[in-house]
Amino acid sequence: MPGSLAANHFAFCLPERHIALRPAMPREAAKLLCLDAKGQMQDRAVGDLPKLLRPGDALVINDSWVIRAALVGVRCARNGGPDVAIHCNLLRRLEADCWSALARPGKRIRVGDALRFGGDLEARIEAKDGASLHLRFDRASKVLDEAIEANGRAPLPPYIAGRRPADAQDFTDYQTLYADKAGAHASVAAPTAGLHLTENLLERLQSLGVGIIRVSLGVGAGTFLPVTAEDVSEHVMHSEPFQVSHEAADALNAARAVGGRIIAVGTTALRALESCPWIRGKIQPYSGETRIFLRPGSRFNSADMLMTNFHLPRSTLFMLVCGFAGTQAMQRVYAHAIAADYRFYSYGDANLLWRADG
């Protein structure tokens, strides 16, 4: 297991102008900073992937669907007082009709309050801990899912939502083109590395002989949280559901058997792969929950390469890429990206990393 690490070791300063508020258009026009196995950097574009990969390689994508988890509504009037505007972000489904959520302003609501979203979607607060709530809705299962889709907004991360409201364009921009609405697990945040991939780019890769392998991991809002513990080993990792099917596992093992490289598109795809059992060098299918915390000192069994966006300082995701490609190497990558005007975070540019021990 990884040893003791200071969280401040993963801090860096990012000028606000580098935070992308909209994605590149077309998607594959985003910059791609490549760091190869020898530690050499090269400035490319996502559209150059067919030049960087080779026949027999396998691209692993997370096809989780992002629900419209941001709900804007009111706390219904009580004791003759006025309604109060409320913003809620759904976090995790607890039961068919119950979700955990974050709400603001948290001080204006209490257990027992009724909330109304849009025209007729209502919920009651069953439990409250600070800004965290348990919401019991007036409908359940698929009917509730449809109401959330009808009334919700794209769940933009705080560093975007704090600077502009979500709009209709975000319903398209904050969803991968291959997201499966009927898939194994839904997300309340996007698997952002996949936002760069277009149908044309995927077709070009497949024509080259690169396999496209789907896994599913339901991305939670905890993915954006910084590590507040001074010692990284004391951080409590959030749990996320995932599935790597028999078909996916067989395809991954087949690619490895013929010398193909495994390229994880995003930290969520990588976390799904690393959460599976490995027996005699072969990945086994698995479905369940993962709290895996990948960081410097972790052993990486699955991917040879990782395509990912640029992450927040002190975040578990920045620690993951430091574990994958080397902390000093990633510090150089991020310094170069800032100097070269790369765009950061969910709607920003990407980097393609070769595993440090590969």
Image (tube, rainbow, N blue to C red):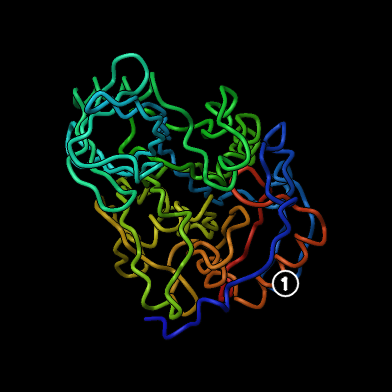
- The reply, left or right, for residue 121 in relation to residue 11 is left
Q: Which residue appears at 57% of the width and 47% of the height?
A: 193
Residue depicted at 82% across the width and 58% down the height? 340
Q: Position of residue 293 (x, y in %)?
A: 39, 67
Q: Is residue 229 above or below residue 194?
A: below
Q: Nearer the viewer, residue 272 or 112?
A: 112
In the image shown, does 64 or 8 lie closer to the viewer? 8
Locate the N terminus and report the quarter of the image it occupies.
bottom left
Q: Quadrant of the C terminus?
A: bottom right
> Which residue corresponds to mark 1?
332
Question: Which residue shows up at 56% across the image and 40% down it?
Answer: 161
- Closest to the observer: 259 or 198? 198
* Res 196 quadrant in image: top right
Q: Is residue 246 above or below residue 5?
A: above
Few, some or many residues within 10 Å of mark 1 (<14, 14–19, 20+): few
For badge 1, the amino acid type reads Arg
Give the camera-side residue of 341 and 354: 341
For this orientation, the residue located farthest to the front is 80
Q: Position of residue 93 (x, y in %)?
A: 25, 40
Helix, strand or loop at mark 1: helix
